[in-house]
């Protein structure tokens, strides 16, 4: 079992979730996020580390819709 320390804010009102953790570390570049979302990751939990950058969104509207379409569920 892997445990991810709760260093995140609540965006989806979910108290818990499970699945294999897929981690990405990127800095102001969403291409790896897009490639990951396009790959098969059903049932996994994607954690994106953006290096505390504020100028570049890691998950905007189009990538969020891609994730919803691929995973068949909302993004939290």
Image: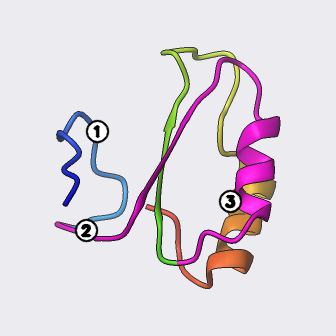
Picture layout, residue 28 above or below residue 61: above
* Separation (CA) of disc 3 from disc 1: 18 Å
Task: Identify the element where label 3 is drawn.
Answer: helix
Q: Is residue 13 left or right of residue 38?
A: left
27 shown above or below 62: above
- Locate residue 26: give its quadrant: top right
Q: Which residue is mark 2?
A: 14
- Is residue 20 positioned above or below 29 on the image? below
- Residue 57 is one of the magenta-drawn residues: no
Tell me where residue 37 appears, x and y as whole percent: 71, 59
What residue did someone put label 1 on? 8
Front-most of residues 24 and 75: 24
Q: Earlier in the sequence, mark 3 or mark 2?
A: 2
Name the residue located 69 percent from the left edge and 71 percent from the top edge.
40
Task: Say which label, 3 or 1, has the lower sequence index.
Answer: 1
- Secondary structure under badge 2? loop
Residue topped by disc 3:
64
- State the extent of the magenta-drawn residues as a range: 15-42
């Amino acid at each position: 079992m892997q445990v991810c320390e709760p260093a995140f804010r609540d965006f989806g009102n979910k108290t818990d979730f499970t699945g294999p953790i897929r981690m990405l570390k990127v800095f102001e570049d969403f291409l790896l996020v897009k490639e990951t979302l396009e790959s098969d990751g059903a049932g996994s939990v994607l954690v994106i580390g953006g290096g505390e950058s504020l100028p570049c969104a890691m998950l905007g509207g189009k990538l969020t819709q891609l994730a919803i379409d691929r995973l068949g569920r909302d993004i939290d």
